[in-house]
Amino acid sequence: MAPLIEVQHLKKYFPTARGQLHAVDDVSFTIERGTTMGVVGESGCGKSTLGRTLIHLHESTDGKILFEGKDITRVNSKELKQLREDSVQIIFQDPYSSLNPRMTVEQTIREPLVLSRCFSKTEIDKETERLMDLVGLDRRLRLSYPHEMDGGRRQRVGIARALALNPKFIVCDEPVSALD
């Protein structure tokens, strides 16, 4: 059985006024199913860029990304949409900037469930409550907006949203830094 993720010589460079910024430079690793991998390094060394590149929030400059043995390094928009719906999610480092300020907690957590069109309204309601309970969000907060909550609660919303479709792979970009 193929590893969940296999990264081969991944590179992500950004053009700057001074030339190319090598944010991720020749990184290779394998992640087996059911395992966790931590990436440690100083601030600004490319950890977040690596995670964002793995799930195509940034396109790689070079190298290869294999997901369950399939090359996903270059995917079209339809394949990317399917990959994000079925298999990969991210928990962002900054929950305030990653949440829609016009959506309540409930709307934010429900959105991926609704967009997947795989659940009835009753199932969506139950799953939303289950996810809120799972991440430790009091149900009384379901109609709250991001600006009405502290950083820890906002981060819990982001975690619940990432877990909503039971992805196979989650990039966690400092997911507990805001939690109390």
Image (cartoon, rainbow, N blue to C red):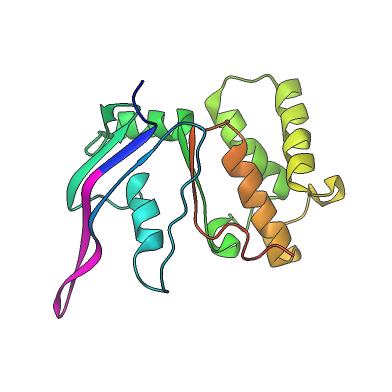
Residue 71 in view (yes/no): yes
Question: Taking 125 as reference, is 107 above or below it?
Answer: below
Q: In the rendering, at what x and y percent does residue 174 appear?
A: 54, 60
Residue in the image at 73% along x and 66% along y: 150
Residue in the image at 55% along x and 64% along y: 94
Q: Nearer the viewer, residue 52 or 174?
A: 174
Question: Taking 8 as reference, is 102 above or below it?
Answer: below
- Is 74 displayed left or right of 57 in the figure? left
Of helix, strand and loop, which mostly describes the magenta segment? strand
Position of the N terminus by quadrant: top left
Q: Nearer the viewer, residue 177 or 109?
A: 177
- Is 98 displayed left or right of 133 in the figure? left
- Is 95 displayed left or right of 3 in the figure? right
Q: Quadrant of residue 72?
A: top left
- Is 12 displayed left or right of 90 in the figure? left
Q: In the rendering, at what x and y percent does residue 177 appear?
A: 61, 65
Question: Taking 146 as reference, is 66 above or below it?
Answer: above
Question: Taking 43 as reference, is 82 above or below it?
Answer: above
Q: Nearer the viewer, residue 103 or 57?
A: 57
Q: Quadrant of residue 14?
A: bottom left
Does 11 lie within the magenta span?
yes
What residue span does the magenta drawing correspond to?
Answer: 8-24
Position of the C terminus by quadrant: bottom right
Q: In the rendering, at what x and y percent does residue 169 appear?
A: 47, 37
Does 134 lie within the magenta span?
no
Residue 108 in view (yes/no): no
Residue in the image at 78% along x and 48% along y: 136
Q: Nearer the viewer, residue 14 or 27?
A: 27
Residue in the image at 54% along x and 57% along y: 98
Number of numbered discs visible in the structure rendering: 0
Q: In the rendering, at what x and y percent does residue 113 appear?
A: 61, 30
